[in-house]
Amino acid sequence: MGRIDDLANRYVADWAPLSPTGATYVGITGYDDQLDDLSPAGYEARAELTRRTLAELDATAPESEAERTAKEAMQERLGLELARHDAGELTSEVNVIASGLHEIRLVFDLMPTGSEQERADVAARLNRFAGALEGYKTTLREAAATGRVSSKVQLTEVAKQCDTWTDPHGDNFFHGLVQRLDADGTLGADLRRGAAAATAATAEFAQFLRTELVPRGRDKQAAGRERYELASQYFLGAKVDLDETYAWGFAELARLEAEMRTVAGRIAGPGASVDEAVAVLDADPARTIQGKEAFRDWMQALADKAIGELHGTHFDIPEQVRRIECCLAPTSDGAIYYTGPSEDFSRPGRMWWAVPQGVTDFSTWREVTTVYHEGVPGHHLQVAQTAVRAELLNRWQRLLCWVSGHGEGWALYSERLMDDLGYLEDPGDKLGMLDGQAFRAARVIIDIGMHLELEIPRDNPFGFHPGERWTPELGWEFMRAHCRVPEENLRFELNRYLGWPGQAPSYKVGERIWLQAREDAKARRGADFDLREFHRQALDLGALGLDPLRRALARL
């Protein structure tokens, strides 16, 4: 480890006390009883650390090729984080999936609770929750006073989420958490007091959103080109031609839907439509699991099977990574997500499923590809393997560097890879993968189209409202026509896109760049190209922006 690595490691040590919540997410111990300072001063302290670190990076020369890659990765990530802070994005953004509120709520899902001290840490955080939200209100008020505020729709939807988390007849998140811990005595009293305070603070935050921010919120949800360009670059770690990417989205969706129709014929007979094939699959009792616990167990078995079969054949999976936990999330937001292991792997990587209320039946043909996306060779292999590589990567690379286009692009690439490796020979599983790919291609079209308010091509392959300008209403109509997702989930998805510009396309565009990087490697190495070696070298670089990834791969 050289000077760049020393600097990166110092950054992590300085960052953890400024972001105790983030420390828990990545498994750094010692801060589990604290929450982030979400006041303006807290945001500025984190930004100042970033400025100072960037200045030191600029003045420090790398001592090896590995350090050159680390420096480029760190400059790219921290530079964009600072740009977003200076643009007011970090201090004003409130949407249905990402905000200061969501960060401090979700952290409780990852906290260890086995010992009395660990349960005491939960109690301490619960009792600090109201204070953190008060600081966050101040930040949002100051941002709104300068004209930086989220849209009325996003603010209203987040208020509804608060209602759900505090509903005594629904999720009742904080009280449910304390009930599961089942502590008595002084600790039990601290936990119950904290749960009551956090519940009240969350309900008050919903009121704050409705009464103070919604009236000041933006009527239009579209980000506009300037904001969108910064967001797209941040989520991809690459600059792309947005207009070319928008046009490519239409071509890619048309290609995928043509392939889906071919597979549908294998399921429901020649000439069958995709919807007819879906009806056949959904009616097959062998492809349906009843009960969310049984569905979790099915996911666990499939994830374990993939790890066992891929290790030693297509990947060399480190021992610590050969364990993954499939979990049911404690809320019913309808999200599917992965959380990485702790630094010492005492907490394994986990695949989470937040099952919507009332859902009891699950179609396996839709979710085989999801398990590969979230597990191995998707997120779990990528994230957990990075955490293992202490001999190759500094602590910042292993713990703090995450780029959506790199991570989600790899996970989507992994779904297609499993088809290439013969794991989706069942036509139902293949249709599930293609349907998921088409869903991500549709996101490219409507996310760019809605936020840039582009014209729908007059010659688009679907004959969809040619020549009109995208609106949220047209986005909903397009998604309904091209995505087989339950309406409740689809509403959440559309709200997510409108509130989190640039993130949704990072899956499909990220996969596109990963595939291009693989083709570039094939061209460079010719007959010497080896796919297993390409994957090993690429993953050993750790997470980084996709432009730095391409440059690093070209130097290998």
Image (cartoon, rainbow, N blue to C red):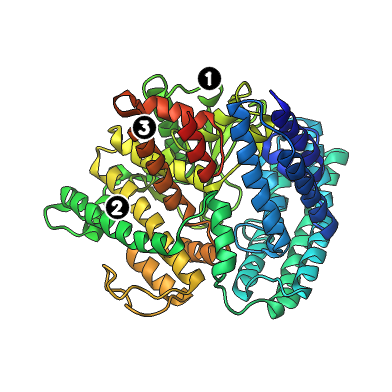
Circle 3 sits on which residue? 524
Q: Amino acid at mark 1?
A: Glu
Specify which label sits upstream in the sequence, 2 or 1: 2
Q: Which quarter of the rendering shows the N terminus?
A: top right
Q: Nearer the viewer, residue 31 or 147?
A: 147
Residue occupying the point 69% across, 42% down: 180
Circle 2 sits on which residue? 282
Which secondary structure lies at badge 3?
A: helix
95 sits to left or right of 211 = left
C-alpha gap between disc 3 and disc 2: 45 Å
Circle 1 sits on which residue? 319
Q: Nearer the viewer, residue 251 or 129?
A: 251
267 sits to left or right of 196 = left
From the viewer's perspective, is residue 62 above or below residue 22? above
Specify which label sits upstream in the sequence, 3 or 2: 2
Q: Amino acid at mark 2?
A: Asp
Q: Amino acid at mark 3?
A: Arg
Q: Position of residue 469 (x, y in %)?
A: 42, 78
Q: Check if mark 2's residue and mark 1's residue have beta carbons within 8 Å.
A: no
Front: mark 3 or 1 = 3
Q: Check if mark 3's residue and mark 2's residue have beta carbons within 8 Å.
A: no
Total labels: the figure holds: 3
C-alpha gap between disc 2 and disc 1: 37 Å
